[in-house]
Amino acid sequence: MNRELMKDFLREQFPNPERKGCPDEDVLQALAEDRIAPNDPALLHVGSCSECYTEYLHLRREIEEERLKNHSNVLPFPDRSKNQTS
């Protein structure tokens, strides 16, 4: 299944506007940082609650942006294949 299609499905198909049974923000942050055990009930909840899944995606995006910002001064390895002569 297409990754974006799956994200859209999870964001839309499990509405929970009252946030019933939702973990607190600290748990979602820990989940986004991969600090939660794979068998933690919060993981199952995020996969069945559109609001939590959307918040989780937002937190993951923030983490990735921060990671890229902190490593922006690292140059990629040069592509030496262009400099080789046959």
Image (cartoon, rainbow, N blue to C red):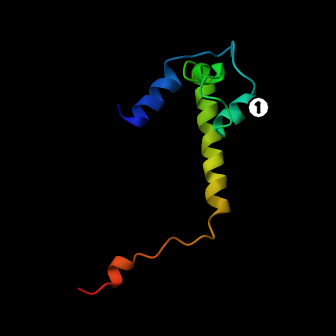
* Identity of the residue drawn at 62% across and 24% down: 51
Snapshot quadrant of residue 83:
bottom left
Which amino acid lies under the numbered mark 1 shown in the image of this protein? Asp
The residue that label 1 is drawn on is 26
Which corner quadrant holds the C terminus? bottom left
Residue in the foreground of this view, choosing between 48 and 42? 42
Does residue 62 lie above or below 39 as drawn? below
Q: Is residue 20 left or right of residue 82?
A: right
Q: How many marks?
A: 1
Residue in the foreground of this view, choosing between 34 and 6? 34
Q: Residues within 10 Å of mark 1 (few under 14, many from 20)?
A: few
Does residue 52 lie above or below 74 as drawn? above
Q: Which residue reaches farthest left?
A: 86
Q: Is residue 82 left or right of residue 61?
A: left
Which corner quadrant holds the N terminus? top left
Q: Secondary structure at mark 1?
A: helix
* Identity of the residue drawn at 61% across and 41% down: 60
Q: Is residue 5 left or right of residue 31?
A: left
Could you say where residue 14 lies in the image, as x and y percent from the top left? 53, 17
* Identity of the residue drawn at 51% across and 70% down: 76
Could you say where residue 34 lies in the image, as x and y percent from the top left? 64, 38
Residue in the foreground of this view, choosing between 67 and 9? 67
Could you say where residue 75 lies in the image, as x and y percent from the top left? 56, 72
